[in-house]
Image (spheres, rainbow, N blue to C red):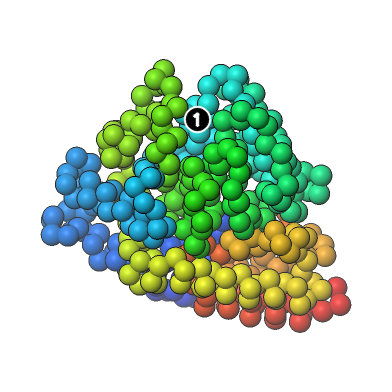
């Protein structure tokens, strides 16, 4: 692989690349600026946020205000608890079944590829009666099953699915009412748009894609789900422990939560809320898919109704051309467009921190590349 340094000849630390990494990925620039301004002296404390005790009122305020902002932005009432945990999306693959079911209980899952499979594997390791009740494996995960057509088993404790499939590039766009609690892994589309939460019982998302840095995972739990939690869980793995201690049971990832807080402030105060953010994210995805669909050189195999607004996947006719595309993009200061190692091809991630201007820059590059390789 030839990639050396993008933006050759540029010297300033503010000469930034167009970043389409799948997560961790781009952070909104105003958030970086604010974090930079406050880096040595946070809010008159005379120290950086990284140097404050996690028991200080400043850190607890950041945690509490972040939870409040999430509730305000998502229009959630007091029926939801919001907590900040560690262990990434992967620990939630275990905490969800541990908290919401017991050994031998029925739990239903939908298999939409890579991360959904990992969630299934983790839950199976806990001796549950797990059934995959719908899957898109038969078509190489190029669509998501219709949630209105699935058959949930009687007495199932919950249904789990992954709303946005980061690796394969698909997304569920609606969450209909179903006869069991719905638990959703929203790690790659959390707070990227307005969602109807009335039918959801638990949402979890690691922060490193749309709302912050790696190290913190946001979990939203409908209060009525707490009643069924067993008293035999290890304290650290019991959601109630973290609710009771306002996400400060043990040392939280303070700097990661601080960046989440800054991003939430940016969404609320600079962008104007999730509806406005959704418009921008939609524009970005439209622009990119339009470019992909209008050139023979690029092919997106995902069914149109299931295409992800967050991770657009596409292929070029040969491996060599794909490699040339990735290299040429890199040399033009565009990074992170390589597909997941299990899928090949290309993948462009369009999380909240990716600006419309960045997508316009990528599309201009893709148009030029397509023109140059016309007929291939
Ligand atoms: C949808 C989804 N769920 C879960 C994970 C795993 O998250 P983590 O690496 O934080 O454990 C990922 C990782 O990218 C993901 O995209």
Q: Identify the element where label 1 is drawn.
A: helix
**Residue at the (21%, 54%) spot, across then down:** 48
- Which of the 4 image quadrants contains residue 44? bottom left
Foreground residue, 81 or 306?
81
Q: Residue at x 69, y 45 (%)?
A: 112
Q: Position of residue 336 (x, y in %)?
A: 58, 61
User: How packed is label 1: few (under 14 Cα within 10 Å), some, or many (20 or more)?
Assistant: many
Residue farthest toward the right in the current orientation of the protein: 375
Image x and y of residue 225, in percent: 45, 35
**Residue at screen point 46% across, 52% down:** 208
Q: In which quarter of the view is residue 239 placed?
A: top left
The answer to whether the residue bearing label 1 lies less than 8 angstroms from the nearest atom of ligand 1 is no
Q: Nearer the viewer, residue 129 or 371?
A: 129
- Residue 284, position as x, y percentages in the image: 57, 72
Image check: 181 left or right of 34?
A: right
Front in this rendered view, residue 85 or 322: 85
Q: Is residue 134 visible?
A: yes
| Above/below status of 96 relative to 170 | above
- Report the residue at 53% width, 65% height from top: 19
Q: What residue would you read off at disc 1?
A: 100
Vertical side of 186 occupied by 361: above or below: below
The percent coordinates of residue 201 (x first, y second) are: 49, 42
């Amino acid at each position: 692989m030839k990639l050396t340094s993008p933006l050759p000849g540029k010297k300033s630390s503010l000469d930034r690349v167009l970043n389409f990494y799948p997560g961790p990925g781009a952070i909104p620039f105003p958030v970086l600026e604010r974090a930079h301004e406050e880096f040595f002296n946070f809010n008159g404390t005379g120290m950086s946020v990284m140097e404050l005790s996690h028991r200080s009122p400043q850190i607890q305020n950041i945690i509490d205000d972040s939870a409040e902002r999430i509730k305000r932005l998502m229009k959630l009432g007091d029926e939801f608890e919001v907590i900040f945990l560690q262990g990434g999306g992967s620990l939630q693959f275990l905490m969800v079944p541990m908290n919401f079911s017991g050994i031998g209980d029925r739990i239903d899952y939908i298999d939409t590829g890579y991360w959904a499979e990992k969630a299934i594997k983790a839950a199976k390791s806990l001796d549950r009666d797990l059934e995959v009740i719908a899957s898109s494996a038969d078509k190489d995960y190029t669509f998501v099953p219709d949630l209105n057509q699935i058959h949930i088993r009687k007495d199932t404790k919950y249904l789990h699915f992954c709303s946005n499939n980061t690796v394969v590039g698909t997304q569920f766009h609606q969450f209909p009412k179903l006869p069991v609690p719905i638990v959703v892994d929203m790690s790659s589309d959390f707070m990227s748009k307005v969602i109807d939460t009335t039918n959801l019982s638990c949402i979890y998302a690691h922060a490193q894609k749309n709302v912050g840095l790696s190290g913190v995972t946001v979990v939203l739990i409908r209060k009525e789900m707490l009643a069924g939690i067993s008293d035999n869980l290890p304290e650290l793995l019991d959601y109630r422990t973290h609710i009771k201690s306002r996400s400060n049971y043990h040392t939280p990832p303070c700097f990661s939560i601080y960046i989440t807080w800054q991003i939430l402030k940016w969404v609320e105060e600079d962008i104007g809320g999730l509806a406005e953010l959704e418009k921008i994210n939609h524009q970005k995805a439209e622009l990119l898919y339009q470019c992909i669909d209008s050139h023979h050189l690029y092919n997106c195999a995902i069914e149109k109704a299931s295409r992800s607004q967050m991770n657009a996947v596409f292929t070029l006719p040969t491996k060599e051309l794909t490699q040339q595309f990735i290299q040429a993009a890199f040399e033009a200061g565009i990074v992170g467009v390589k597909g997941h190692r299990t899928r090949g091809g290309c993948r462009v991630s369009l999380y909240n921190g990716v600006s419309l201007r960045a997508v316009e820059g990528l599309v201009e590059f893709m148009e030029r590349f397509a023109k140059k390789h016309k007929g291939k």
